[in-house]
Image (cartoon, rainbow, N blue to C red):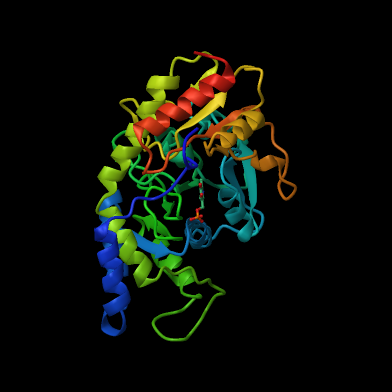
Amino acid sequence: MWPHMILTAGPSITEKEINYVNDAVTHGWNERWSEYIVKFEKAFADYIGVKHAMSTSSCTGALHLAMSACGIGKGDEVIVPDQTWVASASVVRYVDATPVFVDVEPDTWTIDPDKVKKAITARTRAIIPVHLYGRPANLSAIKDIADEHGLLVIEDAAPAIGALHKGIKAGKWGNLAGFSFQGAKLLVTGEGGMLVTNDDDLFAQARHFAEHGRVAKGFDISDIGFKYKMSNIQAALGLGQLERVDELIAKKETIFNWYLQRLGDVEGLSLNKPNDDETKSIYWMSSIVLDRNFGISRDQLQAELKAVNVDTRPFFPAMSSFPMFSDADTPVAHHLAEKGINLPSGHARTEEEIDYVCQQIKRLLKVS
Ligand SMILES: Cc1ncc(COP(=O)(O)O)c(C=O)c1O
């Protein structure tokens, strides 16, 4: 038995981040109160290839600001994949609009563009593609549909920092996009997020709502706004992490390849779809889906793995199964919700650990 729990997630923090945070804590006040915030936002915008980036306290906050900046509200519909974290749908409700759930593709686990087309009505205002587990949705197809119907695209890129579709970074395709630096993500700031856009007007509107609906510098307010700020100390951590982004993505890819070598040939077991010329996932979470009956349920498999010190996470339930939302005909999202598992994918994972995890999975599934 492995001597400690092999966790699904966990960051990589080095002296670089510690030094930046120390500097921010010690000196990042008064005239220097926003120095790391400014540097982090600029470096992040440059990395994604967009004009504007605004740090926030979470990706949820960034997506809420995106909804508000676009003027989405009561009576509007927003198309959301049914397989995602609830934040992608909750932000639609925050502005009193209605999320319309659409199924995902069985191999990419991201929103199915053909089904998006069928879900469009006269009330549709926007599409929120979600780059689940670090794989970008089919952004070119979604952008084409949005352009044809005059819709906005707001990318939920929470787990997909550095992912590419057709050579362009996730986050650069949409009118706006949100990223997450919550403690389990590729880059962490404890909690945190980033809103990005190339659109000057949308950015100005987002900034307005992010500052409590402030008219200009000063205390005049013209709208009910919000406060979703990131601190200078968190931004120092984020900057240090961003300067290591290539190394951190490379480790995720290495972990996925360790799984692929060991589990890729098991009949009836799907892993994340491997990258091809069009798509570069960052494999934030290496995952498996039990596509046939292995004589053990997904939940039993997770419990048995836990008993031998292997931590896993189930895929998200289908959003349409929650009481606050409307039903949808989304068999793929439901299948993934019942049969999908995220495997240990934290930065500290070693090949020996992954070897052990795969041996345990094969033992419990009774495959070789
Ligand atoms: C797909 C997706 N969207 C949104 C979020 C929300 O991010 P945050 O926790 O920073 O608000 C997450 C976080 O796990 C996520 O996985």
Tell me which corner region of the image, top left, top right, bottom left or bottom right, holds residue 331.
top right
Rendered residue at 68%/41% (across/down):
320
Report x, y in % for residue 317: 64, 39
Residue 357 percent coordinates (x, y):
47, 29
Asked if residue 325 is positioned above or below residue 194 in the image, the reply reads above
Q: Residue at x 43, y 19 (%)?
A: 264
Q: In this orientation, does residue 272 appear?
A: no
**Looking at the image, residue 101 lies above or below residue 367:** below
Question: Which residue lies at the image location 73% right of the left edge and 39% below the top edge?
Answer: 327
**Residue 4 horizontal/vertical position (percent):** 48, 42
* Residue 124 picture location, percent across and down: 59, 46
The one of 223 and 307 positioned closer to us in this rendering: 307
Q: Residue at x 31, y 39 (%)?
A: 251
Task: Look at the picture and state if 274 lies above or below 33.
Answer: above
Q: Nearer the viewer, residue 247 or 336?
A: 247
Number of numbered tags placed on the structure image: 0
Which is nearer the eye, 114 or 232? 232
Viewer can see residue 282: yes
Q: Is residue 12 left or right of residue 153?
A: left
